[in-house]
Structures are given as structure tokens and as C-alpha cells.
Amino acid sequence: MALNLILLIKYSFSPTHPPLFPFFYLLKKYMPKRNLFSISCSYGDVVDLFVPSSAQVFDGKIIYCVAPAMGHNKDSHPECHLRVPSIVGALDNMKLTPKFRGSEIFELQNFRPATVDDIASVHAKAYVVGLEKAMDQASEQGLIFIEGSGPTYATPTTFQDSLVAAGAGISLVDSVVAASKIGKDPPTGFALIRPPGHHAVPKGPLGFCVFGNIAVAARYAQRFHGLKRVFIIDFDVHHGNGTNDAFYDDPDVFFLSTHQDGSYPGTGKIDQIGNLNGEGATLNLPLPGGSGDIAMRTVFDEVIVPCAQRFKPDIILVSAGYDGHVLDPLASLQFTTATYYTLASNIKQLAKDLCGGRCIFFLEGGYNLDSLSNSVADTFRAFLDEPSLASEVDNPDILYEEPSSKVKQAIQRVKHIHSL
Ligand SMILES: [Zn+2]
């Protein structure tokens, strides 16, 4: 503990290591002033630090970042610049922002963008540098499509916007990890960011995704915080092929994806389980079209929980895509606002049980602005341990019967493959 604090202090004050500034800000803001100590760190500096007398040092329940990438936009494209403002507007309307909740909800602002080196922990440097250069072309033409990347567009601000999105995730890792070292109940993080990331492969962008935000954060958690074992849950309706590929050989990052069978980009078959040392540390569960709340509850209890318990993670990161919602235009699962509430609540509890509550959500898909915003708002309510308001927005009349026998078969098969 003491060593950790010393390292944190050093990092907090070093101009070359700004990422822990938010942590120090939180310390100063929330720690009781009577516990002021001076600590000599290993570099000879003497600094003042508020040390808690009890475990409860930060009583907030949510810490979030907003990175709307307003310049990264294409008219009538589903992955447009209205998405994050729509969520933020809904949070405000539903009184789920710091303005209404005081210290219970904290918005981390002025976080640092990711560096090229951060991104290069996942992506080929040639891609990162090439994308930066492509900004000249985007400036001349206004908007370009990146060759071979599926329908991924770029505007003159795409490179910088993508660094900011990845930086938000990194900064949340800093803050959540730091809070977990001084309290037993750290806030749950949510990176409200775009462009999304889980399709971006190590060598390039794909499927609306530019940099693998969650993969970069996972590597960062390992490298800068010594959190060796990272458990990634991806409940976006599409397979997180980029995250899958980044860690396919890696036994220390468990990637678990549920997605609609046959949906874009066509990867994530049930027998894709990792390779070499990473064999068994990738779990892909394609769900039949029409799968909904019952399917996801069963998957959580019978697959996600035993998998995570066996893996023993140090942190849980979540690719939170809301395009599995029944109202989403890009797919045909039947998740509801209530499904996302239950998922968020269960994942938060899982993190509490297994890894000191360290848990961060990353926005991925979700293209119906109403269902996206309502679902994120209910996710916030789950993090706050408040009741769901899903029944006010979900319409059970539009749901049809889930393909329960096919779902059961898929679950049995994945349990057999992974010995769960
Ligand atoms: Zn998606």
C-alpha cells in the first residue's frame, strides 16, 4: 500500500506522467483534511498527502468521461456526432449528472489524449502514423473513407478525436485503479466516447472503429498499474474482432464476447477460443437472432460468472455496445433497457466480488439515439444501486418469443468447449 502510494505520488507530480493528476484531484477533493501526512518518496521529494482513516475515501459511485468527437461525423451515418450528446442530454434530463448528484457522480474533465505510444501498444505504428498523415487528405477532401476498413470514414479531426477517445479510457483506468487502492468501493467508470473501438484490428481501422480504446486501456492497466490479468466482456451486438485479435495469443487478457450470430464482421465463431498460450482465454458466444433478456441473464449466470471466477481478474473492462437493443436499426437481438440495467448491475457486482470493484465501461455501438440514451441512463442507475426505470420506456408489446432452444444449445456448447 505504502509503496503504491509513493509511486502514485511520484507519477502524479511528474510532468512527464500527467495521467494520475485526476487521481490526485480526487484525493484532495474527497479525503478528510484531518489526515494530512507528509511522505518522502523514493526520489527524495517530500509531499503532503491526505491519508484516509477509514476505507471510505471517495464516496462517489460513478466516474465518467465525455469525448463526443464532434468533428468526426458523416451526415446520415449511424455512427454520427449526435450519439454522445444525446446520451449526455438524457443523463442531464434524468438528473444523473454531477450537477444534480454532487460527489456521487464525477465527470473527469481535461483528461489527456492518448499518445502514439499508448496506441502502439495495440496497433502497428505504421497504421498510427499513416492515419495522422491521412489527415492532410481528409482536410483537402473534407471526408475520406479508409481503404479496406469496411465503412469507416475519417474527417480532418479523426486522428485527434481518436486519441482523445482512447485517452479517456486510460484516464479512467488511472482514476478507478487509484481509488481502489485507497477504498474498497471505487467508482465504476464509464467512457462515453467515440469513435468506438472494438472492431479496429492491430493493423488498421474497421467497422466505424479507429483505435481499439478498450484494448489500449487493457495494455495500459497492465503496463502502468501492474494489473496483470484483464477480463474483457463485450456485449455489443457485433463481434469485437479487433479486441479478439489483439489478445488472441495472450493468456493474461480474457476476451469474452456475446454477439448476434452471423452479424458483422462475421468473425467470433464459437470454436475461436484463442491460440498458443492464449488458447482458452478467448470465449466467443454467437447468439441466435431474437435472443433477448432471458438469454442474456442465462449467459451471465452460466457463462460469464464461472469464466470470470476461474480467470481471477485484476480488473474488468466492458465493451458496452447498446446495438443489441430491440429498437436498434443495425441488428436483430431483443435486449431491452432492462437487459442493460441487469447486465450493468451484475457486472458491477462481479467486479466487486473478484477484483476490488475495478470496472470500466467503454461505449461501443448503439445507433437508435433514444434506446441508446435510455439504456446508458439505466446503466448509470445500476451503478448507483438505484432502481431501474426501464419499465417507463420499454414496450413489451414489440417483443416476440426468444429462440430459447437454440440459445440453450449455444450455451451448452460453449460450456462444453470451455469446460464450464
Ligand atoms: Zn456494434
Image (tube, helix red, strand yellow):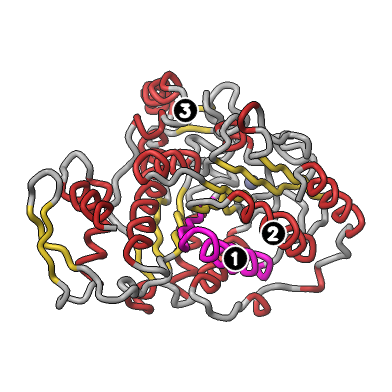
Question: Does the magenta portion include 354?
Answer: yes
SS at mark 2 in the image: loop
Magenta stretch bounds: 337-363
Identify the amino acid type marked 3: His
Q: Distance between the residues labelled 1 and 3?
A: 31 Å
Identify the amino acid type marked 1: Ser
Q: In which quarter of the image is the N terminus?
A: bottom left
Q: Nearer the viewer, residue 213 or 329?
A: 213
Residue 91, given in percent of the width and then of the height, sits at 47, 70
Within 10 Å of disc 1 (Cα), the crowding (few <14, some 14-19, many 20+) is many
Q: Can residue 151 be seen in this view?
A: no
SS at mark 3 in the image: loop
Residue 77, given in percent of the width and then of the height, sits at 58, 43
Identify the amino acid type marked 2: His
Q: What residue is drawn where x is 48% and y is 56%?
A: 360
Q: Label 3 belongs to which residue?
A: 123
